[in-house]
Every structure is written in C-alpha cells, then in structure tokens.
Image (tube, rainbow, N blue to C red):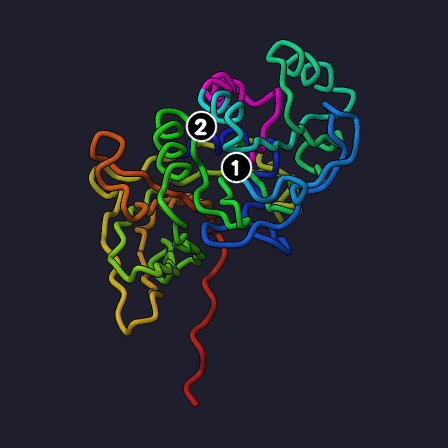
Amino acid sequence: MRGLACTLCALAFNVCGFSAAFAYSPNVGDRAADIRGYDAISEKTVSLEDYAGKWTFIDFWASWCGPCMGELPNLLNVTSPLRKQGKMNLFSVSLDYKGQTEQDLNKVISEHDLDYPVIYDGGGWDTVQSKEWGINSIPATFLLDPQGNIVARGLRGETLAPALDFFLNYPGVYAPIGVRSSAKKNAAGGADVLLELSNPRQTPLKVKVEWYYMRLKWADDDPEHKNRPVNREFVEPEAGSSPIATEVSFEGGFGEATKVISIPPAADTQRLSYYVSVMLPETEALNNGEGLWVEGSGNVKLDEDPPAPAAAP
C-alpha cells in the first residue's frame, strides 16, 4: 500500500499522537519555510535560503530508516549528473540520535561520499528542523522551484527521475498546484477527508484517496491511554473499497475547489491513516502513461466522538 513502509518508520515517533499541531505544515503549492542548522558535512551553520535560485530537493531521512537507506543510492544516481550540471541542489535533514545512531550517520556520509548539507542536531524525532516542518514519517522529500515554492513531495523510486526531468526542463515557469487536506471522524465511525485544491490552469485534477486502519491495545493499568499502546495491528480496508478515485473540477474562475471524501469505518479500530494523491497537470503522458502524482497524508483518531453539529440559529 502507498506510504505504508514510510509510516512504519513513523511508529517510533508516537503511535498515540498522530496529527500533532505544528506552526508550519508543508504542502504542495506552499512557499517553503527556511531550514537552518548545523551541517554534519561542512561543520558549519547552513540555511536553506543559501541555496535559493535553483531547483532544490529536500530529504528528511535517518540512517536507522530502512526505506531511507534503500532510496539513497537512487537519489544519488539520479541527482548526481544534474548537480554537476548546476541544475539543482540537494539539502537534507538527518533524524539520527546523538549517542545512539550518530556513528551510523557518519558511516553513511563516508561510504556514500555525501557532499551536500546534512542538517543534524542529534534529536531524532525531536530534531528541531523536522518539528518545524511537521515531519512525522520518513523518508519525506520535497522539490522546490527556484522561487522557493513546493511543487512536489514524496518523489522517490521510479518516479524521481522522470519528475526531475519534467520540472528541470519545463519551458518557462511551472505554475504549482496546491494540495491541502484535513479529516475528522464522521457519524458513521469512519472519516470525512476535506480536500482543498488549487490549480491556476483551472483544469480538472485527478485525485486518489487511499487509507488503512490501526487496531491498538493499551495496558490494563493505562485506562486513560496516556502511554503508548502495548500492541498495534495494521488493518487493510475491505477489498474494492480503496482507493477512491475521483476528478475535481474548478468552477467560478478562481482555480480553487474543495471536495469531501468519506472513508467507511472498520470494526474495532482506533486510528485511520489516509493518503491523498493528485496527478500533476501536464504530466499525463509521463511515467508510462501513469502521470506524476503528488501526495499528502493525515491521520484521524477513531476512538473519539466527532464534534457535535452546530446549533441552529
């Protein structure tokens, strides 16, 4: 399932507290906030703003993250010639732990001869820069245009090379779309996902929503669920129910649209994670006709009552 391997890396963060509130939540279409910190390569303080003016690929990763390490060779192979040509930058943030995985981080840097910023403060999931960006699963990747706008996120694997080829060789300025989502438990016990999309072209956008549930069990001496669960089980949706595919149209000439996707409930589950995928305009013929998609995600607590409807005036 899309995103599941990445979410497994997130379990060490906090299974109980999915959706923490952050001051900045990076979405496609947003202007990227600055990232500033100690660079384990140059041993100096560096800033993302220092790399403005070129396409920049941001990678949040850790040496203890299996999917991150699996993707690193592909990232280096695809981006190395582009960087040598001066077409793009790489900028990364390590979620390694001081005194626990710091040696592994240094080993990765040495063995792969990394020569781009690796921001590191030793905080793991509490790394300042990852908290500032609201990162709760890794690898987390973002592509910024020369103006500092996030035009894509979640690029990796087979989609990375065609995506970079498309963006870096696009004639003129590619007008980024905007993808935001939020969700809440609905009266049926599932979740309603609110999509907020923007597209300056005002052409319809193809959208897919996928999800999985989680069944949690807490210790007998933790009736208020203050600690992490003692057991967790991933629950797949019923066959044929996921993904939900739809098309969102833009009316009124403003290039903005909203749509609500209702996800059905699953018996005896306490959490729901969803993934929103939107096909980028003008990429329909790429990736063997599958197009290029950008992703967003979120989580919902299913063991809490939905908010009561507003009283009639």
Magenta residue span? 56-77
| Disc 1 element | strand
Task: Locate residue 273, reporting x and y percent.
Answer: 43, 43
Q: In the rendered image, which quarter is residue 227 located in?
A: top right
Q: Is residue 245 above or below residue 214?
A: below
Q: In the rendered image, which quarter is residue 109 located in?
A: top right
| Residue at 36% across, 41% down | 170
| Residue at 41% across, 50% down | 173
Q: Which residue is denoted by mark 2 in the rendering?
A: 5
Given residues 46 and 304, the one toward you in this image is 46
Q: Residues within 10 Å of mark 1 (few under 14, many from 20)?
A: some
Residue 2's disc is: none
Visible residue check, residue 110: yes
Task: Locate residue 20, reporting x and y percent.
Answer: 60, 50
Q: Is residue 288 above or below residue 143?
A: above
Q: Is residue 13 left or right of residue 36?
A: left
Mark toward the start of the polypeptide (2 vs 1): 2
Q: Residues within 10 Å of mark 2 (few under 14, many from 20)?
A: some
Task: Locate residue 45, reporting x and y percent.
Answer: 78, 35
Given residues 163 and 273, the one toward you in this image is 163
Q: Nearer the viewer, mark 2 or mark 1?
A: 2
Q: Quadrant for the C terminus, please.
A: bottom left
Residue 217's disc is: 1
Q: In the rendered image, which quarter is residue 198 located in?
A: bottom left
Task: Locate residue 241, reporting x and y percent.
Answer: 23, 43
Q: Is residue 163 above or below residue 250?
A: above
Given residues 275 and 105, the one toward you in this image is 105
| Disc 2 element | helix
Q: Is residue 138 left or right of residue 118?
A: left
| Residue at 29% across, 46% down | 208
Amino acid found under the numbered disc labelled 2: Ala
